[in-house]
């Protein structure tokens, strides 16, 4: 048996000053740390990539290791919108509505070629990338991406969450970004 | 026969159901609630929308809307050379993509009139049956999840990874396999692939037996599924049901036996049939089919003939890379095939294979050009999903979810 | 009775006459014949009811567009299967593009409902008597029938596809 304590990976403490009995750091970093290690994904699975997400949730790849133990099927409680699979034009408004229902801070991951750019389906009925309806933070390439790639996409969101300024969501740039997508 | 082990209280449940249906008739005029189920709903696997008229927990009417993932396969297929259509078929029923790939390849081979060597046919059979197992495995384990048993899902998901390992060894991809070529396979089964298949054959029966033990005689599972979402054989045939869903109603139609392709005639296997066409029967039929698929793989694996893994059809089958570098002729063929400059003969063919969900047909019209003039996919999901309304009306909302999972409707195949 | 292409064709011609069953050929082992829209329902009903044939399964329906065939641009293909005899056959009906009207098959096969809606969506076939003939896969607001050959495949609103990327 291996040593259980050695196999468990602990989240590293943020930068700060420590002394006897105290540890001082900025609020931003603590909140970032907490957010990054407890991201609840909303699996918006439409097609093939959703099947790979099933594998990612399964025992072999185990997305829970990254703090995403609980897939949140309600947009109100979700932190990341994982859009997996082709989004047809008929589906576009639904994606937007789900995004609008999510609370800040929210991140969007476009998993797979279809969600990123329409993929091989350059046709009249397919939305050519979800960034036409909602702002996207991380793109995961692949058709479909391997579970490792989906995990990597999640880790990139963790980086974003860790380093994001608490005020970013109030900034005029962010408001302008949402306004450009017509999202209030 | 998969249905002998039914309990006597099936009839009691039926009686209960009949009584409830009678009560429903009286209630028809009272106020109903409208409930929008989907297109994104955690309990529906894929994107289907149903607008339900509910009387309490009971569904009185349902209006399905589909097309949320319409990708225009048939239009794209008219603009792509024959080789570039295989990746499209992957994305139709993505739970069992090798069946789609090979079904399409066999259709084109039929148009071109290519004879496939035995070895290639047997390799295809092994791959197709593995795909069928992975398809049924998802369907039945998800059915468990929907009735509250998550364990089985996690357990068999691991086994699916082993199937994906085999795919990876054979073609390099896990899910959208793009496996094989027009004229056979793109490479022979490697020793490692053979080893992995052998290991799978040894290990999987134990896992599947355990999975069956957990669900088949589980009191809660039986209560949730017996008599739920039933359909008669007549209605099922009228609705164009095929595959396990039709066989659960008691009709033994299986393309592998009716119109054998790819040497299916060489193998000995049985077609399990159900009796009542309800969710439990569909579960049992799929379960039994997994055992039959294992039996077929075992036979094909043991009797794998020697010989070439592809047909001798240089016009359509990519030459080996080594020859492309050394021989002029091979280079020309390689260029023409890769650039899609191969003309197919004029003709019209229909070929169907037994897909994970039923008769997966390809109707190909060629006008002698480089792309199909028309390629129509007979997608079993699209055809039988229209019966869903009829199957859930009169039942409860929770049962409707189980019915949907047991039908194994795959959104990609439904909307094409 | 063993069903072969010859005896089935003979039977159908005897019933419906040479002028209504024509252009029969066998491209891939499945007999393909053409009839007129006036006779299509009667023909399929006859195949369904006849004791020797028992063609009682609708495998698929597919539209085809031949823009060059003047006066018979649109083709509807019905593929039927007799599960009892394991016998398949294919029936085609040609209609002009300006008048793509066919009678509905939903009274015989429930499966025809969505297949006909799909054919309406893709090609603009109008099925008289269909209970609910609306688009099925595309959005309701769509103004054309995308599978017709004159319409392009690609999304026409893309700006990021510049010719230089494709060496054009």
Image: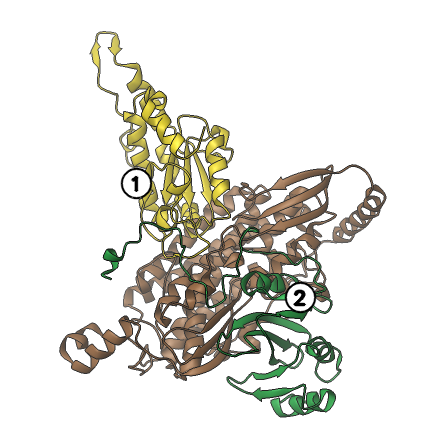
- Determine whether the residue tagged by mark 2 lies in a helix, strand or loop: strand
Q: Position of residue B391 (x, y in %)?
A: 69, 54
Q: Residue at x 60, y 71 (%)?
A: C59
Q: Position of residue B111 (x, y in %)?
A: 43, 81
What is the spatial separation of the Cα atoms under label 1 and label 2, in whole angstroms?
A: 51 Å
Give whichever of C54, A6 is nearer the camera: C54
One can see residue B93 in this view: yes
Quadrant location of the N terminus of chain B in the rendered image: bottom right
- List the single residue furthest toward the right: B26
- The hue in which chain A appears in the rendered picture of the protein: yellow
Q: Residues within 10 Å of mark 2 (few under 14, many from 20)?
A: many
Above or below: residue A39 compared with residue B328 = above
- List the single residue furthest toward the left: B326
Chain painted in brown in the figure? B
Residue denoted by label 1: A152
Above or below: residue B103 compared with residue B137 = below
Chain painted in green in the figure? C
- Determine whether the residue tagged by mark 1 lies in a helix, strand or loop: helix
One can see residue B273 in this view: no
Q: Residue at x 41, y 84 (%)?
A: B113
Q: Residue at x 62, y 80 (%)?
A: C86
| Residue A99 left/right relative to B284 | left
Q: Nearer the viewer, mark 1 or mark 2?
A: 2
Q: Position of residue B92 (x, y in %)?
A: 46, 60
Q: Position of residue A74 (x, y in %)?
A: 51, 33
Q: Quadrant of residue B397?
A: top right
Q: How many marks?
A: 2
Residue denoted by label 2: C127
Q: Residues within 10 Å of mark 1 (few under 14, many from 20)?
A: few
**Disc number for residue B268:** none
């Amino acid at each position: 048996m291996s040593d259980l304590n050695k196999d468990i990976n602990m989240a590293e403490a943020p930068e700060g000053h420590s002394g006897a009995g105290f540890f001082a750091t900025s609020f931003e970093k603590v909140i970032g740390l907490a957010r990054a290690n407890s991201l609840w994904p909303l699996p918006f699975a439409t097609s093939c990539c959703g099947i790979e997400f099933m594998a990612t949730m399964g025992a072999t790849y185990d997305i829970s290791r990254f703090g995403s133990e609980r897939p949140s099927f309600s947009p109100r409680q979700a932190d990341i919108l994982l859009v997996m699979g082709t989004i047809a034009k008929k589906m576009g408004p639904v994606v937007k509505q789900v995004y609008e229902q999510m609370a800040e801070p929210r991140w969007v991951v476009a998993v797979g070629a279809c969600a990123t750019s329409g993929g091989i389906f350059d046709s009249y009925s397919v939305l050519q990338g979800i960034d036409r309806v909602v702002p996207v933070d991380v793109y995961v390439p692949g058709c479909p991406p391997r579970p490792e790639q989906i995990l990597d996409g999640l880790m990139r969101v963790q980086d974003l969450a860790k380093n994001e300024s608490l005020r970013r969501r109030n900034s005029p740039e962010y408001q302008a970004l949402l306004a450009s997508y017509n999202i209030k | 026969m998969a249905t002998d082990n039914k309990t006597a209280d099936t009839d009691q449940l039926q009686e209960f159901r009949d009584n409830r249906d009678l009560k429903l008739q009286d209630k028809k005029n009272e106020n109903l609630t409208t409930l929008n189920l989907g297109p994104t709903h955690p309990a529906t696997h894929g994107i289907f929308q149903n607008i339900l008229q509910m009387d309490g927990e009971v569904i009185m009417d349902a209006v399905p809307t589909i097309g949320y993932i319409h990708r225009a396969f048939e239009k794209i297929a008219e603009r792509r050379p024959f080789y570039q259509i295989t990746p499209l078929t992957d994305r139709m029923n993505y739970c069992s993509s090798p069946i789609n790939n090979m079904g399409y390849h066999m259709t084109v081979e039929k148009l071109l009139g290519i004879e496939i060597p035995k070895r290639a046919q047997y390799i295809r059979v092994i791959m197709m049956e593995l795909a069928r197992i992975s398809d049924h495995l998802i369907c039945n384990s998800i059915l468990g999840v929907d009735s509250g048993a998550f364990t089985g899902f996690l357990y068999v998901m691991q086994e699916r990874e082993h199937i994906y390992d085999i795919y990876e060894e054979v073609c390099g991809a896990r899910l959208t396999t793009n496996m094989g070529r027009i004229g056979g396979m793109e490479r022979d089964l490697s020793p490692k692939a053979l080893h992995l298949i052998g290991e799978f054959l040894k290990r999987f029966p134990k896992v599947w037996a355990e999975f069956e033990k957990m669900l088949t005689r589980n009191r809660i599972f039986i209560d949730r599924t017996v008599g739920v979402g039933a359909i008669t054989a007549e209605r099922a045939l009228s609705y164009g049901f095929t595959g396990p869903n039709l066989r659960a109603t008691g009709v033994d139609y299986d393309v592998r036996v009716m119109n054998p392709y790819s040497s299916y005639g060489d193998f000995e296997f049985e077609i399990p049939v159900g009796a009542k066409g309800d969710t439990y029967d569909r579960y049992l039929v799929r379960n039994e089919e997994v055992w039959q698929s294992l039996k077929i793989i075992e036979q094909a694996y043991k009797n794998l003939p020697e010989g070439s893994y592809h047909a001798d059809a240089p016009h359509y089958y990519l030459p080996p890379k080594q020859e492309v570098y050394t021989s002029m002729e091979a280079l020309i063929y390689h260029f023409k095939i890769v650039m899609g400059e191969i003309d197919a003969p004029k003709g019209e063919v229909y070929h169907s294979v037994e897909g994970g969900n039923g008769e997966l047909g390809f109707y190909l019209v060629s006008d002698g050009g480089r792309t199909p003039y028309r390629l129509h996919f007979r997608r079993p999901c699209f055809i039988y999903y229209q019966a869903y309304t009829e199957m859930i009306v009169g039942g409860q909302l929770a049962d409707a979810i189980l019915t949907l999972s047991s039908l194994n409707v795959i959104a990609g195949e439904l909307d094409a | 009775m063993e069903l072969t292409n010859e005896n089935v064709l003979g039977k159908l011609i005897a019933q419906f006459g040479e002028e209504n069953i024509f252009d029969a050929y066998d491209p891939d082992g499945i007999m393909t014949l053409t009839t007129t829209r006036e006779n299509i329902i009667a023909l399929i009903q006859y195949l369904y009811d006849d004791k020797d044939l028992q063609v009682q399964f609708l495998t698929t329906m597919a539209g085809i567009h031949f823009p060059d065939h003047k006066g018979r641009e649109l083709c509807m293909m019905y593929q039927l299967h007799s599960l009892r005899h394991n016998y398949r056959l294919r029936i085609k009906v040609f209609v002009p593009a300006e008048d793509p009207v066919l009678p509905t098959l939903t009274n015989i096969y429930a499966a025809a409902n969505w297949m006909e809606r799909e054919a309406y969506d893709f090609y603009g076939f109008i099925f008289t008597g269909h209970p609910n003939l609306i688009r099925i896969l595309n959005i309701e607001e769509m103004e054309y029938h995308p599978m017709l050959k004159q319409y392009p495949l690609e999304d026409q609103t893309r700006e990021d596809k510049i010719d230089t990327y494709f060496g054009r």
